Image: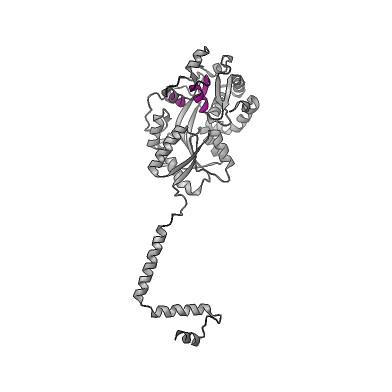
Amino acid sequence: MPEQEFQRAGISPHNGKSVHYALFIIDKFLKEIDMKKLSAVIFVLGFLTVLNVMGQAPSTPGISKTVTVYTSLEESFANEIFQRFEKETGIKVHYVRLATGECTARMEAEKSNPQAGIWVGGVGLGHIDAKNKGLTTPYVSPNAASIPQQFKDKDHYWTGMYVGMLCFESNTKLLKKFNLTAPASWVELCDPKYKGHVQMANPGSSGTSYNALVTLVQIFGEDKAFEMLKKLDANINQYTKSGLAPGKNASMGETTIAIGYSHDAVRFINEGYPLTITFPSEGTGFEVASVSLIKGGPEKEVSAAKKLYDFMLSDTCAEIFAQGKLVPFHSKAKLAEGAIPVSQVKVINQDDEWGAKQKQRLIEKWNAVIGGETKTK
């Protein structure tokens, strides 16, 4: 009997030699079992293990089927583009829309624990500011090759998607009602005849408005620019948080004149709103709407965020931008009828690197001199 053999060997489960006892049992089992049966048992166990692994969700970081996005695109563009991306890739987009300044502020607040993996849209000045603050991370998209070098970061932190020129958007019905003409220059916009008729965004929250502030400084010099901003403040009926809002309000007759981007105004006009577009004769600034990866974003979403980055620079996305009257940088993009190319507008030699570095100082000065927070809604 096996028990007798255990005793002869001095092995018992009760005498402190339990490990030897277990090994003795295994040795006896292997000597006595039919090897064919053992092979069958091993095969079944291996097969069950494979089935178990196949039934488990992959745990490798970076292959999530969702991506969290901060976007400064206009809502209709964001919906169309992200739905198209989801259809083509199967990756679900969860996005929050924020103005450029709001986005950089949130990214800075979340720097120790970022909640999104990518920032899509927003004025290029904001993306440069985010880079300088260590909020974004470099990425070389294969689709960036189609974007001209001057519209992407040399260190690969951001890439431009389309350009938009600052303009004046005037409601033609209200101009007629108040016996006014559309402003033709920055100087004229500050004329007291427009008192209570002008709307722009707060440059602290809006990249569009900060673009306008920096444009004035680069054209007229800082001292004269702030003197003009004080005169302009007397004409302002409201500072909005978003740069898109003034143009929308002008299109609906809630303000006579707005400062905004020409592509937004073109779209409002095509939708039937009574707007007219004028560009300042001294020259105007422009945005390089860009895309950046957020540094330290959710680890499992990194791959999905890069796929979205690539998509934003693709032929498909450029076509969507062009159909919406935007002016994409993509080399294959064909502008839609009514879109205004940069070549038709007097733009300044804009120094975005300088503008980004001066942002905090100029915003603080604007708040001190203008005090626009009390008019911001």
Residue name at image x 63 percent, y 30 percent: 364
Considering depth in this image, is 55 or 360 the residue closer to the camera?
Answer: 55
Q: Examine the rendered structure and indicate whether residue 200 appears above or below residue 106.
A: above
The x, y position of residue 304, in whole percent, is: 44, 45
Work out which residue is located at the far top of the displayed protein and give it. 179
Residue name at image x 47 percent, y 46 percent: 302
Residue name at image x 47 percent, y 52 percent: 61
Q: In the picture, residue 365 is in which quadrant?
A: top right
Q: Examine the rendered structure and indicate whether residue 38 appears above or below residue 215.
A: below
Work out which residue is located at the far left of the displayed protein and give it. 36
The x, y position of residue 255, in whole percent, is: 53, 20
Residue name at image x 49 percent, y 77 percent: 22
- Residue 143 visible? The answer is no
- Read off the magenta span: 241-266
Based on the picture, tell me whether residue 259 belongs to the magenta stretch: yes
- Residue 298 visible? The answer is yes
Q: Examine the rendered structure and indicate whether residue 323 appears above or below residue 179.
A: below
Is 144 left or right of 238, judged from the image as shown? left
Q: Quadrant of the N terminus?
A: bottom left
Based on the picture, tell me whether residue 244 belongs to the magenta stretch: yes
Q: In the picture, residue 15 is in which quadrant?
A: bottom right
Considering depth in this image, is 215 or 13 the residue closer to the camera?
Answer: 13
The x, y position of residue 89, in whole percent, is: 39, 44
